[in-house]
Image (cartoon, coloured by chain):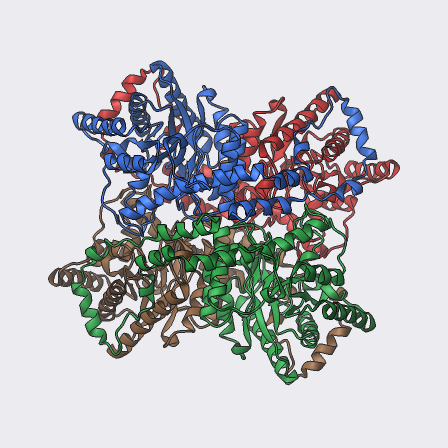
Chain colours: A blue, B red, C brown, D green
Amino acid sequence: MSNFQPTKADKFTFGLWTVGWQGVDPFGTFIRPPLDPVEAVTRLAELGAAGVTFHDNDLIPFGAEPPERQRLIDRFRTALEETGMTTPMVTTNLFYHPVFKDGAFTSNDRDIRRFAVGKTLRNIDLAASLGAKTYVCWGGREGAESDAATDVRVALDRYKEAIDTLCRYIREQGYDLKLALEPKPNEPRGDIFLATVGHALAFINQLEFPDMVGLNPEVGHETMAGLNFVHGVAQALWSGKLFHIDLNGQHGIKFDQDLRFGAADQKGAFFLVDLLESAGYDGPRHFDFKPPRTEDIDGVWESAAGCMRNYLVFKEKAAAFRADPAVQEAIAASRLPELAVSTLDPGESLTALRDDALSFDADKAAERGMHYERLDQLALDHLFGIR
Amino acid sequence: MSNFQPTKADKFTFGLWTVGWQGVDPFGTFIRPPLDPVEAVTRLAELGAAGVTFHDNDLIPFGAEPPERQRLIDRFRTALEETGMTTPMVTTNLFYHPVFKDGAFTSNDRDIRRFAVGKTLRNIDLAASLGAKTYVCWGGREGAESDAATDVRVALDRYKEAIDTLCRYIREQGYDLKLALEPKPNEPRGDIFLATVGHALAFINQLEFPDMVGLNPEVGHETMAGLNFVHGVAQALWSGKLFHIDLNGQHGIKFDQDLRFGAADQKGAFFLVDLLESAGYDGPRHFDFKPPRTEDIDGVWESAAGCMRNYLVFKEKAAAFRADPAVQEAIAASRLPELAVSTLDPGESLTALRDDALSFDADKAAERGMHYERLDQLALDHLFGIR
Amino acid sequence: MSNFQPTKADKFTFGLWTVGWQGVDPFGTFIRPPLDPVEAVTRLAELGAAGVTFHDNDLIPFGAEPPERQRLIDRFRTALEETGMTTPMVTTNLFYHPVFKDGAFTSNDRDIRRFAVGKTLRNIDLAASLGAKTYVCWGGREGAESDAATDVRVALDRYKEAIDTLCRYIREQGYDLKLALEPKPNEPRGDIFLATVGHALAFINQLEFPDMVGLNPEVGHETMAGLNFVHGVAQALWSGKLFHIDLNGQHGIKFDQDLRFGAADQKGAFFLVDLLESAGYDGPRHFDFKPPRTEDIDGVWESAAGCMRNYLVFKEKAAAFRADPAVQEAIAASRLPELAVSTLDPGESLTALRDDALSFDADKAAERGMHYERLDQLALDHLFGIR
Amino acid sequence: MSNFQPTKADKFTFGLWTVGWQGVDPFGTFIRPPLDPVEAVTRLAELGAAGVTFHDNDLIPFGAEPPERQRLIDRFRTALEETGMTTPMVTTNLFYHPVFKDGAFTSNDRDIRRFAVGKTLRNIDLAASLGAKTYVCWGGREGAESDAATDVRVALDRYKEAIDTLCRYIREQGYDLKLALEPKPNEPRGDIFLATVGHALAFINQLEFPDMVGLNPEVGHETMAGLNFVHGVAQALWSGKLFHIDLNGQHGIKFDQDLRFGAADQKGAFFLVDLLESAGYDGPRHFDFKPPRTEDIDGVWESAAGCMRNYLVFKEKAAAFRADPAVQEAIAASRLPELAVSTLDPGESLTALRDDALSFDADKAAERGMHYERLDQLALDHLFGIR
C-alpha cells in the first residue's frame, strides 16, 4: 500500500478561490481572513500540488489600477517560479460584481455584455502570458428566475457571439489556448443556461470554432441535477471534449456544496477516477471545492490535502480492481466485452436483419442473468480494501 | 373567452398507451381493463383530438403471428379512416419484455441488440405505411444501475450504430420519416443514457445522418432532473431539433408521474405553450400522460380532455399576454429587446473592445433594475384571468 | 372581481430582512443599498401590510452599545405608531456572525451556546415590549456537513435544553409569548436538525413545555425536501401547532429561492390559501421572501405587493371553488365526505370486524372510480378564472 | 481482518418480497419466476440470515380459501423450524390489489377502510402465532396526487382511528406485539401521508396508545426526500422509537431504487451502522431491497449476501474508527465531548445568563476551528481500509 503522498507528476491543481474562500454564504459573513495568493501557492506546493488556477479578481481586485495590477501579477509569477508551480487554467469572474446581476455575455444591457467580453479578453492576455492552456468559462449569472424575463433562443445567440469572439481573439493573438465551458443547472440563478454536460456539448456544436471549445465539467454541478457524473464525463470523452475537470463532492440535489473530493458518493468518485485514468485523460486534476466554514486555516490545508489523498486512493484501488482476475471473470460473465462488437455484420442487409427478428427466441434470451451485483460488490470490496 | 373546445386543427395527439394505461405500478396491479385501440381512436376523435400514436406492442401483442398482426392493423386503419384521425408518430416498445432488461440497442448481448434493431425496422415499415412522419426512439432501458456494469463510451458507440442503422434503412426504403430521440434521466434504469435534452442533442451531432434525427422532449422527463423544460425546448428549437414534443405534468424531482398537462407548474406550462406558439412549432401537440390509478374509464376521458383544454387555455392567455400594452411596456423596461442586438459592432476591433472595458463605469451600470418582478406578475395576472 | 388591494384586516406581515435584503449570495456581493427599517415600515404600510417582523440584528447591529440600541428601537417604535403597524413576531439572528458557524444552541462550544441563549433572552424582552405574540426560532446553523462531526442525539439534548430555557424565561417574566420553530432541511448547513415540519413537531413532544411551542413552517423549506407543503401545514394544524407561517415560492428541490408568494407552483399556493382560510387560521400571513437580485428598489416594492396580491387572488378563487355547485357535486362523487365518518361503529367488536373482511367483495369495490381528475380540473378552471 | 461471514447472532433478516421480487416495474413485466417462500427461507438460512419477514400476501395469495391458507402457513412454519429461522416482523399488503388504489386506512370508501383494518387484524393473529414482536404498517397508498382529492386532517383522523384500533386489538388479544410505522414521501402516491421519520414520530404522539407504536425507517425512503438518514434514525432513537429498521441503498432523490445495502452512499452507510451499534440497537437488521432486474436467481443470492457482508464490513470499520487514538484526538480537538455538558449551570439565573451575553467576546470565540475535515477524512481512511 502506498502512502498516497502527491507529487507534481499527479497534476493536481487548485483554484486560488478554493483554499482562499472566506466563507460568505447566503446566511453568514466571512469566517476566515483573506489568504494571500502567494501564501496559497507556497502551501499548495508544499502539499504536493502541481499548479494553481484563478479568476482575474482572485489575483487582482476589480478595478485595480494598472501599476497595482502589474505588481500583483509579478509577485504571483515569482511565487510560481520559486515553487515550480504552473497555472494551466485561468478564468474570469463574471458573477461577483453587481453589474453582472442579470448575466454577463447574455445580459440584456449591451454595454454590460461588451464589458464582460472585454474583461475576459484582457484576462485571456494574462492567461496566455502565464502559459495557461485552458481558459474556463463558467456562466454562473447567465440565466433567469422567471421565464418571462428572458428569451432563451436570443440569449443563446448572444452566448454564441461571445464565445465566438473569444475564439477569434485567441486566434488573432496566436495564443495556444482552448476554451472549456462549465455547465451548472442552477445557483446563483434560478435556472442557468447550459445546464448540464449535455446542454453545453450541444451548444458547442453551434459555434464558429467548435474545435477550440470543450468542457470543464464539475462533479457537484452535474450531481445537483441528479445526474450520474461518470456518465456525463464519459459522454464528454466520447465527444472528444473533456478539456479540463473540476473535482469535488456533493450530497445529491441541494445547494452547491463544493465538498472536498471523495467526501460524498465514494463509489461514484472511485469510478470517476477509474474512468479518467483508463481513458488516458492527461489534463490537470483540478479541485474546485470549498473548505467548510467550520474550519480555520489548518482545516483548510487538511481539506486540500484530503482532496489529493482521496484521488490517489481511488487511483490505486481502481488499478487493483481492473487487475483482479475475479473482476475480469465477472466482467466476462456479464458479456461486457461483447458490447464492443458491432451489432451488424459488415455490409449486412438491413431487410435481412429486420426479418431475422421474427425468428428470435426472446423468452430464451431473457433468461440470461447479467451478474452485475457480483461485479458491483467486487468494486465495493476493492473500495473498502477487503480484497 | 372561448370555450376551449379542441378541434383537429389544434393537432392534439395521444399515445394509445396513455388512455390505455391499465395502472400497473411498482406496488400494484392493473386497475382498469384493457382498452381496445379502436375504442381509443373513436373516443379521442369525439373529444377533439387529431390523431393517435403507438408503440408496436400497443397495437400488436409481442410475438403475434402475421395474420393476427394484419387483422389488428386493418381494423385500426379502418378506425382511423372512419374518424379522420392520423398517426403522425409511431415508436417501438423496447422495454416491456424481459429480453430488454439490460437495454435494447446497448444490451451487452449482441443477439438482443440485433433483435431490437430488427424489431424497430419492422415497425418502421408499419409507421411509414400509416403515413407517420416521425419515429420516436425512447431508450428507457439503455442505462445502468452500477458504474461497474457498463462502459458508457462503448455503449454510445452501439447506440450510434443503431440510430445510424435506422437512418440508413429509412433512406434505403425511401420513407419520408425522421427520428426523434426522447431523453430521460432515470427510471426504469438507475441512470439512463441521453439523460436530458442536452445530452441527446449532443449525441445527435455524432451521428452519420444528423439531419434526420431530432428530439422528442417530455415535460416530465426534464423536470425529473430539476431542469427548466422551457429552457430545454428553447435550446432544441435554437438547434433546429424540436421534431416532436411530449406534454404532461410532473411535480418536481421524484418518480415519473405523467400527470395530465397543466396539472403541475402552471406558470411553466403557460410559458411552454407561449414558446411553442410564438416559435411557430407546427408539429403535433402530443400528450404522453397516465390517467391516475384512482380513475375509472370516465376519469380517463376527463383526464384526456383536461390535457387539451389546458393547452387551449394557456394558448389564449399567452396570446393575450403578448398583446397586452402593459406587458410590452414592462418588456421594454427590462431592455429585453436589446438582447437581440449584436454585442459587437460589425467589423469591430477586438483589442479596442478589450481596452474599452477599462473605462467602463460598472458601478453605475449596476444600478439599473431589470423590472422582472413586474413582468412576471403580469404573466401571473394573465394566468389567473384577472387582467 | 375584487381589486385585490390589501388592507390591515388581511394581516399581511413582512420581515424587515425581506424587502431589506441587499442581495449577497454565495457568488456575489450586495446589489442594493441598505434599507432603513423606518422606510420599510412606512412603505409596507402604504402597500397595505399590517405589520413587520425582524431579527434582532435587522434592527440593531450586532454588538451595538445600549444607547444606540435604544435610539434605534425608539425610532422604530415611533414608525410603528405613526403607521399603525404591529410587530406580531420577532426572532433572533443566530447565523450571520462567524461565532455561530457550527451552530448556536447546539454548538460544541458551551460558551457559544450560552451566548446564543443569552442573546435570545435579551431579544425576547424586546419582543415582549413591542407586543409580539410569537417568537420564531430558526436554527439555520444547527446541523452538520459530516456525520463524523456531531452526535445528533446529544445535539437534540442541547436543543431541547435551549428551548426549555426560553420557555422557562418567558414564564418567569410573565410574557404572553409563544415559540414557533421553523424547520428547514439544509442550507446553510449540509443537513439541518429539525429538517421538516414532521421532525420539528416530533421534537416539540419531547419538550418541557410543549404547549408553549409550535411551528412556523415555510413554503420553500418544505419544498426543498420535495414534500407537499399543504400536507405539512395540514398535519401541523391537526396537531394544534400552526402558530405562524412563512409564505414564499420555491421551484422544487434546489437552493433556497425565497421567491415571492405565488411565483411558483400556483395550484399548490391556491390549495394552501384554501386550507388556511377554511381551517380558520387567524395568525399573520407572513411573507419571508427575497426580492430577486435583478430588481432595484422599485422592483422590491413590486415584489412585496405581488405577494399580497397573489394571496388575495387565491383567497377569492378558493372561496369561489368551494361555493361552486359543480365542485360540490364532484366532491360528493369522490365520496370525500365519507372520509369523515368513523371507520368503526361505536362499540363494535374487533373480532367481528376482522371476520367480516373474509366476505368482502374486494374486486367489486375496486371498480369504483374516484373522479379526482374532474375535481382537480375544476380547481384549475377556478385558478385560471375560466368558470 | 474478519471474513465478514454472517451468523444468526448478527440478526440479519429479509423480507420474502425482497429475494422473491419478480421485477415488475412501471415499464416492464416480471423477469424472474416466482420464488417459493420455503426456498427463500432455506437459502437465506444457508447464507447466514437469522429470519424472514413477510406481507400476508407474500405467503398467502389474496383471497385464498382457509384450507389452502393453512397449508401454506404450515409448510412455511416447518421450513422455519428446520432452519432455525425466525419471523420477528410481519406486515400487511394494503397496496397491491386495486381495491386499495386510493388508500386503505384512509380510503374515502368506508367499506374499504373496514376491509383494510380487518385484513390487518387477521394477519396480526398470524404474526402473533409465529412469534413476531413487531408489526410494520407501511401506508404506501395512503396519500394523494391532487390537493383537491383529499382532506389531510380528516385523513389523519382515520389513520389514527385505524392504528388505535390495531393497538386495541393487540391488547384485547394479549399479544406481545408492537407496531412500527414506515414513512415514505412518495411513490406510488404523488404524496404519501407520514412522509418522513419526523412526520411519523409526530403522528405517534397523537395516538391513543403511543407507547405501543414506533418506527420502521428505511434508508431509501428518507433519502428520497434528500434527508440525512443517520439524522432521522438518531432522532427516532432519541425519541425511544426505533422499533425496527429497513436497510437498503438509494442514489439520492429519484424513484425508489431499493438497492442492496451499501451500494450507495458508503460513508452514510458506515455512519448508520456506527450509530446502530453504538446506540445498542438490538432489533433485527432487516434488509428491504430489490435484486435488480438484470439479475437471474444466482444474482439474487449474490445481492442478498452483499447486503449482509457490507453491514459486517461497516461494523468492523466503525469499531476500528472509534478505537483509533487519532480519531479520539480529533474528536477532542472538535470539542464534541463538550456538547454533552449542560449549557446552563444547575439552578442558574436566567437573567444573569441573559446579561452575560453582553460581555461575551464573540469575535474571539469565532476564531476557533472545529477540525471536522480531519475527522471526516479519518472516517474515510477507515472506510477505505488505509489506516
Q: Looking at the image, can residue C43 be seen?
A: no
The single residue placed furthest to the left in the displayed view is C67
Q: Position of residue B127 (x, y in %)?
A: 74, 31
Q: Hey, which quadrant is residue B203 in on the image?
A: top right
Relative side of B99 to B269, left or right: right
Q: Position of residue D243 (x, y in %)?
A: 55, 70
Residue at 30 percent across and 46 percent down: it is C23
Q: Looking at the image, can residue B156 be seen?
A: yes
| Residue D354 in the image: above or below residue B347 | below
Q: Where is residue A28 in the image (x, y as percent from the top left)?
A: 29, 51
Decide which of B310, B38 is in the foreground and name it.
B38
Decide which of A24, B387 is in the foreground and name it.
A24
Q: How many labels does the image show?
A: 0
Residue at 48 percent across and 54 percent down: it is D268
| Residue B316 in the image: above or below residue A169 | below
Q: Hey, which quadrant is residue A94 in on the image?
A: top left
Q: Hey, which quadrant is residue D305 in on the image?
A: bottom right
Decide which of B357, A72 is in the foreground and name it.
A72
| Residue D211 in the image: above or below residue D311 | below
Decide which of A54, A387 is in the foreground and name it.
A387
Relative side of A287 to B11, left or right: left
Q: Position of residue D212 (x, y in %)?
A: 55, 77
| Residue C223 in the image: above or below residue D180 | above
